[in-house]
Image: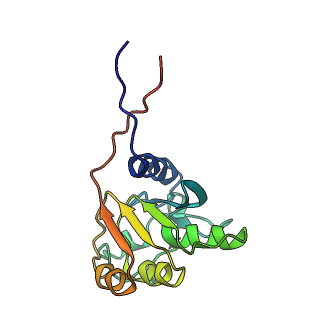
């Protein structure tokens, strides 16, 4: 019988964030977020248009049409970021994110970082870098831990 390596907790939740990202309706980046406390999932979110509205897969990407660089002019987008959606989903279900760890496929933009600071998260874990790195100072000042990991393997290991 071959030995199998069990993923550590960060790899486990980063893999889940990757699966959540598959629901994204953004043509540029598929981003997934998972809010976790005490090894339990509190909420998930992915980037895309507001619920019930036409999205970029249907309408095309306004940012591409206007040649807007990634990480800039966030207001010119019909999408809501994964981090914003994880906060919204938690609030819709009456779940506090205070003390939570947020696992996301990309590092946050500065707007999401501000929201996460106010949500009082403890830690942010990712394997991808977003074009905007101005979140770093905010997280440091707020005492939010930031961990950048290697991208987890996409293979799902099953027991024989």
Residue 46, horizontal then vertical, whole percent: 52, 61
Residue 138 visible to the viewer: yes
In the picture, the quarter occupied by the N terminus is: top left
Would residue 30 appear left or right of 141 to someone viewing this image? right
Work out whether residue 9 or residue 91 is closer to the camera in this orientation and state it.
Answer: 9
In the rendered view, would you say 125 is above or below 131?
Answer: above
Q: Residue furthest top?
A: 1
In percent of the image, x 32 and y 64: which residue is there? 147
Point out residue 59 in the picture as x, y percentages from the top left corner: 52, 64
Residue at 43% over, 49% down: 9
Note whether 26 is above or below 158 in the view shown: below
Snapshot quadrant of residue 90: bottom right
Q: Nearer the viewer, residue 61 or 130?
A: 130
Q: Is residue 148 above or below residue 111?
A: above
Q: What's the residue at 57%, 69% (across, down)?
A: 85
Q: Is 132 located above or below residue 156 in the figure?
A: below
- Residue 91 in picture, x, y percent from top left: 67, 73
Q: How is the image coloured?
A: rainbow
- 122, 108: nearer the viewer: 122
Query: Total of numbered circles in the picture?
Result: 0
């Amino acid at each position: 019988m071959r030995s199998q390596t069990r993923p550590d907790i960060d790899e486990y939740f980063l893999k889940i964030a990757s699966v959540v990202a598959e629901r994204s309706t953004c043509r540029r980046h598929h981003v997934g977020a998972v809010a976790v406390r005490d090894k339990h999932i509190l909420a998930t979110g992915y980037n895309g248009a507001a619920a019930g509205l036409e999205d970029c897969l249907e309408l095309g990407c306004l940012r591409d049409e206007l040649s807007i660089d990634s990480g800039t002019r966030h207001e010119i987008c019909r999408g809501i970021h994964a981090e914003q959606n994880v906060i919204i989903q938690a609030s819709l279900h009456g779940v506090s994110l205070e003390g939570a760890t947020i696992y996301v496929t990309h590092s946050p933009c500065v707007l999401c970082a501000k929201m996460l600071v106010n949500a009082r998260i403890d830690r942010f874990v990712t394997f991808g870098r977003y074009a905007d790195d101005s979140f770093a100072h905010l997280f440091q000042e707020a005492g939010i831990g930031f961990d950048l990991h290697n991208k987890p393997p996409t293979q799902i290991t099953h027991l024989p």
